[in-house]
Amino acid sequence: MKAYKTVFFILCVFGGLTILSSFFPTEGIQVGGALLEFPSLNAVLAIKDEPLEEDLLVEEPTLTPEQLIEKRMEQLRAARDSEFLSFCQLSPTRFFFPNEDSTFLDPVFEALQNAKSKPVRIMHYGDSQLEGDRITGVLRQELQETFGGCGMGLLPAVQTIGSATSRVETSPLLPHYMYFGSPDFRAEHKRYGPLAQVAEVDGEAVFTITAIGGSTYSHAAVFRRVVVALMGSATCTVSTGETEQEMTCSTDETVETLRLFSANLPRSTSKAIVRVNGNAEVFGISAEGSSGVVMDNIAMRGASGTLFTSIDSRTLRPFFQQQNVCLILLQYGGNSVPYLKGGKSISEYKQNLERQIALFKRMAPKSRIIFVGPADMAANEDGVMKTYPYLPMVVDSLRQAALDSGAAFWDMYRAMGGRGSMTKWVNANPPLAGEDYIHFTPRGARKISEMFYAAFDLYYKYYRFRHGQDPVELPDSVTL
């Protein structure tokens, strides 16, 4: 065959594939028991023309997860001493800020420094990676150790998943609805509140709140203040075994919105009994300190982070307006990764998350938002556990969604090692991730939490330096 014919044939093949990729349904075509899929043109071009950042990083392939974690921590320690500029440009554990604004977190640090006189709230939303207070618990302990505060934060009225720091016992058994997970647990309305779940009280309900943090989470092991978030007509009392007092309502009782009943306890305690009498919807009970940092662990099994704009704003906005929320962490993406098959679906997910971030910015305009991307995830491919093929693209899309929306981003996927790292974390001894190749073990959750907090603390150290609070030595090349 002559050369021009060969070239013409190749061009025809590529032309046909381009037409097919342009019109082939992104969800695939079901043929009998098989699903036929074809990559979209956008996905093909993205993979070809935009090399993933992880492909530009050189990691020692022989490092164990523990060695990689130690390498990350060494980089953080070195950056604290003299290499901050290099860290901000190159480190996989750095924060990405909108418009590369190095002062983005300054309002958070200022609020934290004033927390002993004006309590602040940090809300950590996420999917099942947060269950059991595993990641949040470590961050809360560090923050309360540094800036004061105690307690476990906002707890569900009906606790369906165990926690390392709290136990909620509810009597009698109450109707309880969640806006995440199985549709079987949904209510006929959208009044779910800041935890995206609600319990209905008709008569009297008793909630026994117990702090069980122990020495690991010593600051969460006691609390000094109780707050009940509800809507309806009800009275609340709280007792600690020593005293019983009626809780004061912080808003107009005639307004049909979420209201907060609060009571300062005579002294720190690890247990309190809350009684709610009336007809009301209870959105959560907070066990917290009267000063310092309050940090909420809000784990939503199966959630993709796209539900907040559908919740009745009367049960959301008042909470954010009345609480001094300085920081919101959004940790989502993992539950969507298996179902995002190309550029179109990833773009739609990005746009949906941008709407959620915009909602939080409207409800809490003075707070800062950090989006934490998903961890590496692996699935069986021809008998081998491999990273989901579109996960790196999803991570990059989430980072862009955060930055475009005026939020910061922390890349958990690349911080833990990037492509293939989940398999290494599962095979570590002891294991750092579970055999589902999705979730961290408690040990792994602590490692990733410590890495995140070390990066956060590094930026705080340089905030102090820029404000003349610490004599940190910097090289001449660093400009802040």
Image (cartoon, rainbow, N blue to C red):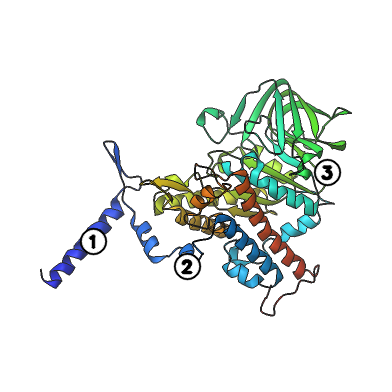
Secondary structure of the residue carrying tag 2 is: helix
Q: How far is the residue under mark 1 from the one under mark 2? A: 31 Å
Q: Mark 1: few, some, or many residues within 10 Å (few <14, many ≥20)?
A: few
Task: State the residue lying farthest toward the bottom.
Answer: 476
Q: Amino acid at mark 1?
A: Gly
**Where 94 falls versus 138 (above or below)?**
below
Picture quarter containing residue 95? bottom right
Q: Are marks 1 and 3 in contact (CB under 8 Å)?
A: no
Q: Residue at x 22, y 58 (%)?
A: 16
Q: Which mark is residue 15?
A: 1
Label 1's element?
helix
Q: Quadrant of the C terminus?
A: bottom right
Report x, y in % for residue 61: 49, 62
Q: Percent x, y for residue 477?
A: 66, 79
CA distance separating discs 2 and 3: 48 Å
Q: Residue at x 14, y 72 (%)?
A: 3
Query: Considering only order in the chain, which callout, 3 or 1, is on the residue closer to the N terminus?
Result: 1
Q: Secondary structure at mark 3?
A: loop
Q: Would you say 10 lies left or right of 75 here?
A: left
* Residue, disc 3: 290
- Name above or below for residue 480 compared with residue 287: below
Reading the chain from its start, which is encountered first: label 1 or label 2? Answer: 1
Is residue 420 visible in the rendered structure shown here?
yes
User: Residue tagged by mark 2?
Assistant: 56
Q: Amino acid at mark 2?
A: Leu
Q: CA distance from mark 1 to mark 3?
A: 67 Å
Closer to the camera: disc 1 or disc 2? 2
Camera-nearest residue between 92 and 459:
92
The residue lying at 68 percent from left, 56 percent from top is 453
